[in-house]
Amino acid sequence: MKIRANSPGRYPILIVELANGALVAAYHETGYDLSRTKPVQEEWVRENAIGRHSFVEVDPPVEGAASALGDYAREEITGEV
């Protein structure tokens, strides 16, 4: 999977591209559990998340295992160790 964008803040939302190309929003509240994500469209990411809601595009996207999403959010976005 690839992390394509994130929301800044204490409880980041991650926009993740799955291996099949689908985009989903993964949430802190669910422990970034990919079975509890919300599907999103590329257009929504560009126009709403990045365009209106201060999400930050991750360029180039960060590739990794789904089990590392929480670590990424904690270390890279919130700065916690």
Image: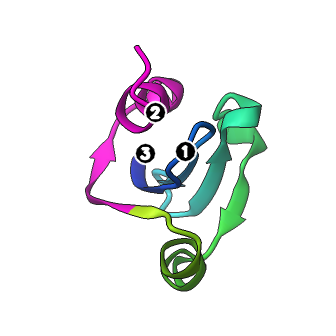
**Between residues 46 and 7, which one lies in front from this camera angle?**
7
Which amino acid type corresponds to the residue marked 1 in the rendered image? Gly
Residue for point 45% across, 23% down: 71
The numbered disc on residue 39 is none
Q: Position of residue 28 (x, y in %)?
A: 67, 36
Give the residue number, with chain letter if any, for mark 2. Answer: 78
Q: Eyeballing the image, is 59 above or below 14? A: below
Which amino acid type corresponds to the residue marked 2 in the rendered image? Thr
Quadrant of the drawing holding the C terminus = top left
**Between residues 63 and 77, which one lies in front from this camera angle?**
77
Residue for point 64% across, 34% down: 32
Q: Position of residue 25 (x, y in %)?
A: 63, 55
Q: Position of residue 37 (x, y in %)?
A: 72, 48
Residue for point 75% across, 34% down: 29
The numbered disc on residue 9 is 1
Query: What's the magenta region?
Result: 57-81
User: Callout 2: 10 Å neighbours few (<14), some, many (20+)?
Assistant: some
Circle 1 sits in a helix, a strand or a loop, which is it?
Answer: loop
Q: Is residue 64 magenta?
A: yes
